[in-house]
Image (tube, grey):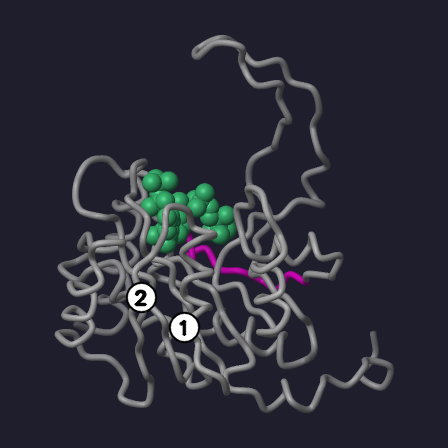
Amino acid sequence: MSDESRPSPPAALAAARTAAVIPAAGRGVRLGPGAPKALRALSGTPMLIHAVRALAASRAVSLVVVVAPPDGAAEVRSLLDAYALPERTDFLVVPGGQTRQESVKLGLDVLPSGHDIVLVHDAARPLVPVDTVDAVIEAVRDGAPAVVPALPLADTVKQVEPARAPGEPEPVVATPERALLRAVQTPQGFDRATLVRAHETVTGEVTDDAGMVEQLGLTVVAVPGHEEAFKVTRPLDLVLAEAVLARRRLNDGF
Ligand SMILES: Nc1ccn([C@@H]2O[C@H](COP(=O)(O)OP(=O)(O)OP(=O)(O)O)[C@@H](O)[C@H]2O)c(=O)n1
Ligand SMILES: C[C@](O)(CO)[C@H](O)COP(=O)(O)O
């Protein structure tokens, strides 16, 4: 679409303030036994603090709402006090729920008025670069109601019929065209009213917030994601995260 024919974004959103909700209430079962995943350390700093810093690094983000493990809100508040964070950013902490969806909703419920763009970012994606955060905000400011950062896939993907018993082979039923598939990351960005409506009306299992907006019949757009925005899910991801941090220290010269 040429610049002339692109619809102008709603003036309110072009100038809107941005808040980030960081769901951090998961246990991290796939990472193995230990503290809740968001509180585990990466290079000596809790994963959650890396994620908070990554979002607060955007000058557009003026409020971060951390959704803490259900019995860990006090600990999260102390962590936010203990680690250096930008002074221009406000922080709120709220206890989370049993599912990611519930945790995000609990974060949305405490958002004060005056923030009309909302990002939702997994604490489990601690290393997202600020340029990715800003690209998502920019696309919402440009008028998209929902924006996801996304990457093309490296692997071929097969659709299977789930095995009837654990360990049994799974029949392959289809091979979706890879060029049309994307792996979706966070932060996902939304016009606040759209995200709130999605969380108030969409029921059933969804794995991301943009999926809820799709169920409202609205268009979600994808912007380029980043390899370093990967989700720390399994033990090998911790090795990769430490390697990325080591490379950043080297590049920063300390
Ligand atoms: N009840 C939950 C479950 C998940 N999350 C958050 O949602 C993000 C993405 O979830 P995932 O990586 O799946 O984390 P876990 O649910 O902790 O992982 P697992 O499924 O391995 O237990 C994480 O930042 C996690 O803390 C949350 O806030 N509340
Ligand atoms: C939101 C998300 O990170 C986008 O890729 C992902 O869907 C979270 O999924 P999980 O099942 O909570 O790991």
Could you say whether the residue bearing mark 1 is in a helix, strand or loop?
A: loop
C-alpha distance separating marks 2 and 1: 8 Å
Q: Nearer the viewer, residue 158 or 248?
A: 158
State the residue at coordinates (59%, 66%): 195
Furthest residue in direction right, as rendered: 5
At x 17%, y 65%, the residue is 74
Asked whether the beta carbons under mark 2 and mark 1 sit within 8 Å of each other, the answer is: yes
What residue did someone put label 2 on?
94
Is residue 207 visible in the rendered image? The answer is: yes
27, above or below 163, in the image: below
Task: Locate residue 27 relative to residue 97 in the image: left or right.
Answer: left
Q: Amino acid at mark 2?
A: Val
Q: Residue at x 72, y 37 (%)?
A: 177
Q: Residues within 10 Å of mark 2 (few under 14, many from 20)?
A: many
Q: Nearer the viewer, residue 248 or 232?
A: 232
- Can you give x and y, in whole percent of width and height, for residue 21 in the image? 42, 68
Q: Which residue is mark 1?
A: 110
Whether 226 is among the magenta residues is: yes
- Magenta segment: 221-231
In the image, is residue 217 above or below residue 206?
Answer: below
Residue 177 or 109: which is nearer the viewer? 109
x and y, in percent, of residue 54 in the image: 35, 70
- Circle on res. 4: none
